[in-house]
Image (cartoon, helix red, strand yellow):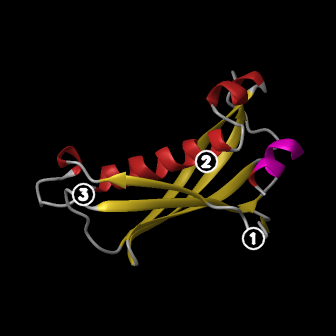
């Protein structure tokens, strides 16, 4: 896959408080919760760029995940205030790589890379990313 890196891609930041419901049997934030935060941050970034789900559907397309890579670095516990930061790092004709960093203060808790593919809606076949959509994230 040929990718062009985003130049100084703007980052989208969310701040969240870790809730008791986020804690797993080991006493820290569970893996699935980190993944949910990655997805939530991507959706919030897309909406902030003018491409919420309704706008995507009006354009006849939606983003779907092809692959996640997640590296867990340090635990978070109930009561922690965390920041979830995401940005589009590289583009292809029909897909992009989005990076996400989850931190508590200066401590990296988790890093993720997600490959998103733009597909037709309805239909589900990959389609070329329109220039105006790509420009909204650059």
Q: Label 1 crowding class (10 Å Cα cut-off): few <14, some 14-19, many 20+?
A: few
Mark before the other along the chain sequence, 1 or 3: 1
Numbered tag placed on residue 29 in the rendering = 3
Mark before the other along the chain sequence, 2 or 3: 3
Q: In terms of secondary structure, where does tag 3 sit? A: loop
Q: In terms of secondary structure, where does tag 1 sit? A: loop
| Horizontal side of residue 105 vs 66, given as left or right | left
Q: Can residue 38 be spotted in the picture?
A: yes
Residue at position x 61%, y 47% in the image = 45
Q: Furthest-right residue in view?
A: 131
Residue at position x 88%, y 46% in the image = 131
**Residue behind mark 1:** 8
Question: In the rendered image, which quarter is residue 65 located in?
Answer: top right
| Number of residue marks | 3
| Horizontal side of residue 137 vs 44, given as left or right | right
Q: Distance from label 2 to label 3 (Cα)?
A: 23 Å
- Asked if marks 2 and 3 touch (Cβ < 8 Å), the reply is no
The dominant secondary structure in magenta is: helix
Q: Can residue 130 be spotted in the picture?
A: no
| Horizontal side of residue 131 vs 45, given as left or right | right
- Asked if marks 2 and 1 touch (Cβ < 8 Å), the reply is no
Q: Position of residue 54 (x, y in %)?
A: 66, 24
Q: In terms of secondary structure, where does tag 2 sit? A: helix
**Residue behind mark 2:** 45
Q: Furthest-bottom residue in view?
A: 106
The magenta segment: 131-136
């Amino acid at each position: 896959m040929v990718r062009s890196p985003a130049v100084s891609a703007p980052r989208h930041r969310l701040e969240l408080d870790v809730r008791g419901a986020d804690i797993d049997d080991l006493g820290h934030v569970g893996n699935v919760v980190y993944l949910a935060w990655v997805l939530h941050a991507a959706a919030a970034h897309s909406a902030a760029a003018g491409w919420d789900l309704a706008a995507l559907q009006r354009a006849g397309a939606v983003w779907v995940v092809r692959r996640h890579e997640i590296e867990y670095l340090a635990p978070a516990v109930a009561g922690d205030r965390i920041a979830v930061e995401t940005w589009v790092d590289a583009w292809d004709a029909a897909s992009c790589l989005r990076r996400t960093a989850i931190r508590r203060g200066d401590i990296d808790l988790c890093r993720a890379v997600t490959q998103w593919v733009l597909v037709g809606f309805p239909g589900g076949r990959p389609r070329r990313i329109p220039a105006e959509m790509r420009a909204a994230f650059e």
